[in-house]
Amino acid sequence: MKCAGGVGAALKARITLAAIEAATALGLASPLALRVPAAAQSVWGGSGSTTTTSDYNTATNWSTPPGVAPTAPGTSATFANTGQSTVNVSAAVNPDSWTFATNAQSYSITGSAVTFNTGAGLVDNANAGQSIGIANSLNGAGALVLNGNGTLTLSNFNTYTGATTINSGATLALSGGAGISNSSVVAVNGTFDISASGVSFNPITTLAGSGTVQLGGNGLVITAGSTEFSGAINGTGGLEIFGGTQTLSGVNTYSGVTQINSGATLALKGNGSIANSLYVGFAPIGGGVATFDISQTKAGASVAGLFDITGVGVVSLGSKRR
């Protein structure tokens, strides 16, 4: 017997629901477990792999089960201390996530783009001083999370939009033309090192955390500030606030120029200091007023100089002095 479309769909839904409820009652599975299959976790060079080439896209280089290369949604990669330490992504891939285990060997990964299918993105748990280099472009909605005490170096321009979190002991380094400007926030509780970047001005959305930013001779640009950073920005480079409000509550020792663009605000808070900066300059880039706000500091702030050739700048003192 055939049922009309609506009746048939309803009957199918009732049968499916009944099956789920029966399985749950028997303790076989929860409804959620029945509806959402787990992602296939493939280990590079893991148990059951039969080849040890450097090709990421070759299924036999990965553990069995699942016996597939993690190249598509529903699959995820784990890198531990097995397989080749040099990995080439020979064609663009779209896995759910990448994870580097605590005991991961040092890796050098190159090749085609990696677009993460879920917010999990890339998690680096390497915890023995490992160096992991990724020359691929990392894209998608995924986050980037660094734990442990290893160093992850990115050397390509990346467009992933999730948060970048650098936890205590970990280092994220940018080299060559690397960029993470689309990341929603860079939260630095370890070290964010742009000293080897080939880009003179390195843009990020907003800076948070309590760690260390190593500029070297390069500049850091905040494009849409909205967070507080209580750590230290060091080096001979400078800081530019392109948009939004960036709050600094730590003692920063960078010696380059501090530039605040029209419509943007640099706020110092508590013991926040940029006393070593060459000078604070206000730039007529965009519309509105460029604001240097020291009203939230404990005892005012010292700067080496103020420069405002077009009159777009305002210093907000509150009850404090500069």
Image: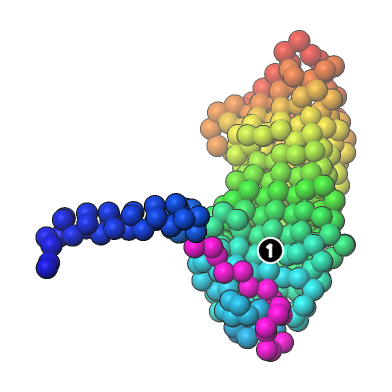
Q: Where residue 176 appears, x then y in whole percent?
A: 73, 65
**Identity of the residue drawn at 65% across and 41% down:** 206
The image quadrant of residue 89 is: bottom right
The quarter of the rendered structure image containing the N terminus is bottom left
Q: Write down the quadrant of residue 63 in the picture.
A: bottom right
In front of the other: 243 or 118: 118
Residue 235 on image: x %, y %: 86, 47
Secondary structure beneath disc 1? Answer: strand
Outermost residue, top side: 319
Q: From the top left corner, tell me how far across and down residue 68 is, in percent.
A: 57, 79
Is any atom of residue 175 visible in this view? no
Q: Which one is nearer the viewer's eye here, 228 or 97?
A: 97
Quadrant the C terminus occupies:
top right
Establish if 55 lies above or below 207: below
- For label 1, the crowd category at 10 Å Cα-Cα, with few meaning under 14, some 14 to 19 and many 20 or more, is many
Q: Can you say whether 5 is above or below 297 in the image?
A: below
Most common SS among magenta residues? loop
- What colouring does the structure picture have? rainbow
Query: Does 46 appear in magenta?
Result: yes
Query: Given the image, on which type of amino acid does mark 1 rest?
Result: Thr
Instruction: Give the residues in magenta.
Output: 37-53
User: Who's the residue at 87% across and 62% down the image?
Assistant: 128
